[in-house]
Amino acid sequence: PMSRFHATVAIALFAVLGVACDDPPPEKLPPLSARVELASGDVWPVAEKERSRLITGAMLPEKAEITVGDGSRALLRLGNGTGVFLRGGAVASIGSGQIELKKGELWADIPADERALGRFVAGGVTVAAADTGVDLKLVGGEVTVYVARGLAVVEAPGGRTEVEDGEQAVV
């Protein structure tokens, strides 16, 4: 038989557990914009105030602009799993579900994701892809899109085209 003490302890324990279970479950937050997986050399966020070098492992805010110095490089991992490698001399901004290449060159390894395509913009040209490896270059106003694996849809002021494995488009 259970003693009065044990019964009181059991009732108190159930009361505490019952109150604890009334707490709401943890709130799921949106994924982070990007993480710096590699920052080698002069990799800087473009900021209005003080300038501080980006380091490997740093998290980027939802909207960010990055400058990669000559001879430097950066590898970013976006919230959707896309890997983006920025070559030296590149300037890019991340935000609104896309990356805008303002200068230089980037390589993107875009995973298969039926919910959201990888989106890139450079010089008025938009590139959308999933399950694709693509190189995007903006030099002197000319945009070059090379698809190493998969398929990318390239939209420019003059129209839209699909670029497949081993093909490139120059706008």
Image: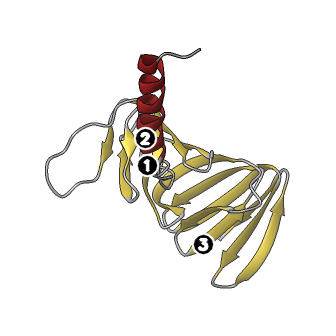
Where is residue 10 shown, x and y percent of the image? Answer: 48, 26
**Tag 2–tag 1 contact (CB < 8 Å):** yes
| CA–CA distance in space, label 3 to label 1 | 49 Å
| For discs 2 and 3, the disc positioned in front in the rendered view | 2
In the drawing, what numbered circle is on residue 20? 2
| CA–CA distance in space, label 2 to label 1 | 6 Å
Out of 7 and 136, give the one closest to the viewer.
7
Type of amino acid under label 1: Asp
In the drawing, what numbered circle is on residue 125? 3
Q: Can I make out residue 88 in this image?
A: no
Snapshot quadrant of residue 54 = top left
In the rendered view, would you say 138 is above or below 78?
below
In the rendered view, would you say 72 is above or below 123?
above
Q: Residue at x 64, y 60 (%)?
A: 144
**What residue did someone put label 1 on?**
23
Left or right: where does residue 127 sit relative to residue 113? left
Snapshot quadrant of residue 159 = bottom right
